[in-house]
Image (cartoon, coloured by chain):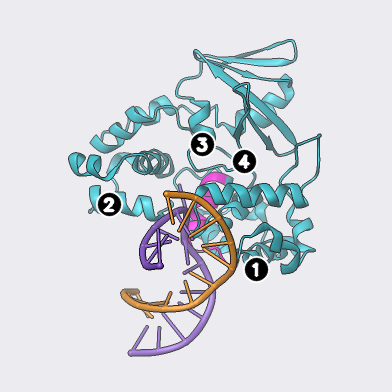
Chain colours: A cyan, B purple, C orange
Amino acid sequence: MKYEAIGNDIVLTDVKCFDLDLCADCGQAFRWKKTEDGYQKAVVRNTVGEIIQKDGVTVFRNTDKETFETIWIPYFDLERDYENILAGFDDRYLNEAIKAYPGIRILRQEPWEAICSFIISQNNNIPRIKGIIERLCTSFGEQISEEDFTFPSFEKIAKLDENDLAPLRAGFRNKYILDAAKKLSRGEISLDTVEKIPIEQAREELMKIKGVGKKVAECALLYGFGRIEAFPVDVWVNRIMEELYPDGLPECTRGVEGIAQQYLFHWRRNIDEKEVKNIV
DNA sequence: AACCAGGCGCATA
DNA sequence: TATGCGCATGGT
């Protein structure tokens, strides 16, 4: 990885295995939007990201080295050697998925945002998840520019009630969002603790929240806490497991199951049923 | 017009 | 431990 400041931009080169559009839109983060001039735009933490990628060069608009290093390197997991990890996947289906959608990386989002987003994701579809989260942010986030809002803090959400959340149209998930915000706000669950403890205990901690079961906990750990060994099984991954891995994941994914999962998930979501039959 | 969506809580056995 | 049902909402 090389990067340099040019004017108000940071220009990133020489990163292997990094497809911005795929990262932004493969179902792990829900706030990225493509602007008319081709930039991917989202608020991450308190920072507006406007990023464009062409011919292996990635330009982060209107930022500086410090922001790049503190926000964007961790967010896009840029220090991790994905090329090496993927090369270790000695498996036919994984190789198909990687060939079809190269350049997916696991985004390290804010823990609370990941927990809340994947509570919203349950029994829901991605376009609707995005809509609910957008309304959540514009309603209760901090406005940091004309059109940009942060993801609202759990402290802020903890002060609300179900009526306040009704306009989000999140349905039965509203009470789960409130329970999560309140438990975090009261300190019944500590994000710092969850970050440090072994993954089995971290799962249990997160599942104290109503509306957080195995799958949501796993997503929070993978996308919010950088636990790349977490392995969320949703309906799509479940199909994959039944169709392709009846005896479980191949050994080569050990320790990086979450990365394998993301490739398989996106691949399976984007192939039609006939194609599946051909592969099996 | 049923069926489904990056599931979970709860009741029942 | 395992299964089955209801749940809010909106898209296909």
Query: Residue beneath label 3, please?
Result: A25
Please state if A19 lies on the left or on the right of A177 as rendered.
Answer: left
Height in image: A88 above or below C1? Answer: above
Front in this rendered view, residue A70 or A215:
A215
Query: Is tag 1's residue or tag 3's residue first in the polypeptide sequence?
Result: 3
- Location of residue A104 by image quarter: top left
Query: Residue beneath label 1, please?
Result: A175
The subunit carrying tag 2 is A
Local secondary structure at mark 3: loop
Mark seen at residue A31 = 4
**Badge 2 vs badge 4, beta-carbon distance below 8 Å:** no
- Residue for point 39% across, 26% down: A84
Q: Residues within 10 Å of mark 1 (few under 14, many from 20)?
A: some
- Disc 2 marks which amino acid? Gly
Query: Residue beneath label 2, please?
Result: A248
Local secondary structure at mark 1: helix
Please state if A159 lies on the left or on the right of A57 as rendered.
Answer: right
Magenta stretch: give its range: A210-223
- Disc 1 marks which amino acid? Lys
Query: Is tag 4's residue or tag 1's residue first in the polypeptide sequence?
Result: 4
